[in-house]
Image: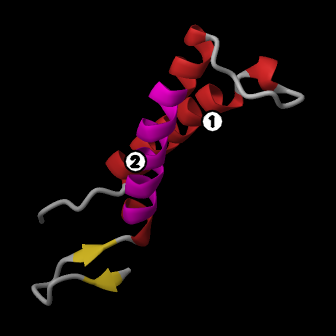
Amino acid sequence: MAEGTGRGESLSIWFFVGGLTLLYGIILLPYGAYEWFSGHESSTVLSNLHPTFWWGLLLTLFGGFYTIRFRPVKG
């Protein structure tokens, strides 16, 4: 793990990966729900599977897990 602020703290890179993944999921999930429930889907071959919604949900869960699992703790 990389050194933190020089006070003996260490931050895992997975905390930042989880934070970015959570952010992407939080952005995609409501947009995917909007597309699905309003009928404004793109005209792609597999649009009936609603990939934006499902990827947003997956990224939110994955990012939330990594953010909580690798959060910096004192002590």
Q: Residue 27 has which mark?
A: none
Which amino acid type is shown beneath numbered disc 1? Trp
Q: What element carries label 1?
A: helix
Q: In which quarter of the image is the N terminus?
A: bottom left
Residues shaded magenta: 16-31
Residue 44 located within the stretch drawn in magenta: no
Q: Which residue is drawn at 40% across and 47% down?
A: 23
Say the numbered circle drawn on residue 55. Answer: 1
Which part of the image, by quadrant, shows the C terminus? bottom left
Residue at x 51% of width, y 19% of height: 34
Would residue 27 be counted in the magenta stretch? yes
Residue in the picture at 60% in, 26% down: 53
Where residue 60 appears, as percent x and y from the top left, is 47, 37
Residue 15 lies, with reference to residue 58, above or below; the image says below
- Few, some or many C-alpha atoms within 10 Å of disc 2 (few <14, some 14-19, many ≥20)? some
Q: In this view, does 16 lie to the left or right of 28?
A: left
Rendered position, 29 above or below 38: below
| Left or right of 31 on screen, residue 5 | left
Q: What element does badge 2 sit on?
A: helix
Q: Name the residue under label 2.
A: 23
Which SS does the magenta portion mostly show?
helix
Residue 5 image point, x, y percent? 15, 84
Q: What type is the residue that disc 2 sits on?
A: Leu
Of residues 15 and 34, the one drawn nearer to the viewer in this rendering = 34
> Nearest the camera: 47 or 63?
47
- The answer to whether 48 is drawn above or below residue 61 in the figure is above
